[in-house]
Image: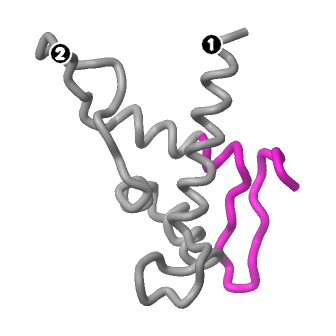
């Protein structure tokens, strides 16, 4: 189902977002983030730095909860390797790669 712009309902009633929906939400979080500074001291065009944990906390609540329900709570005691922040980090890399390739072509 990768690349499908819709959500799938889960047995617990939450909806798990597919790539476009989650990518759009991540882009929105990054667009609202504080800008990094250039060497001149002026605000730069991109966020200084956001971790996947920060992005997760800033996502709209329904999306945030759907990721937790699907991939589990992040952190040391999660008991699993791939969690909600892993999915965010994975998709953030895909977004960066897509944007880079779009600029290059």
Q: Quick check: 42 left or right of 45?
A: left
Q: Quick check: 54 left or right of 82?
A: left
Q: Quick check: 25 left or right of 41?
A: right
In the rendered structure, which segment of residues is drawn in magenta? 1-23
Q: Residues within 10 Å of mark 1 (few under 14, many from 20)?
A: few
Q: Which residue is mark 1?
A: 103
Whole-percent x, y for residue 60 in the image: 45, 56
Numbered disc 1: secondary structure: helix
Q: Which residue is mark 2?
A: 39
Quadrant location of the C terminus in the rendered image: top right
Q: Residue at x 33, y 32 (%)?
A: 47
Q: Quick check: 86 left or right of 15?
A: left
Can I make out residue 26 in this image?
yes
Q: Which sits in the foreground, 57 or 94?
A: 94
Q: Residue at x 58, y 68 (%)?
A: 67
Q: Residues within 10 Å of mark 2 (few under 14, many from 20)?
A: few
| Mark 1–mark 2 CB contact (< 8 Å) | no
Camera-near label (1 vs 2) is 2
């Amino acid at each position: 189902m990768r690349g499908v712009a819709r959500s799938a309902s889960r047995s617990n009633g939450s909806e798990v977002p597919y790539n476009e929906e989650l990518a759009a939400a991540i882009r929105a979080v990054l667009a609202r983030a504080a800008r990094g500074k250039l060497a001149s001291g002026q605000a730069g065009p991109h966020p200084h730095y956001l971790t996947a944990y920060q992005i997760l906390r800033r996502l709209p609540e329904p999306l945030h909860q759907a990721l937790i329900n699907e991939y589990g709570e992040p952190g040391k005691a999660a008991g699993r390797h791939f969690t909600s922040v892993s999915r965010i980090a994975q998709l953030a890399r895909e977004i960066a790669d897509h944007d880079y390739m779009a600029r290059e072509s």
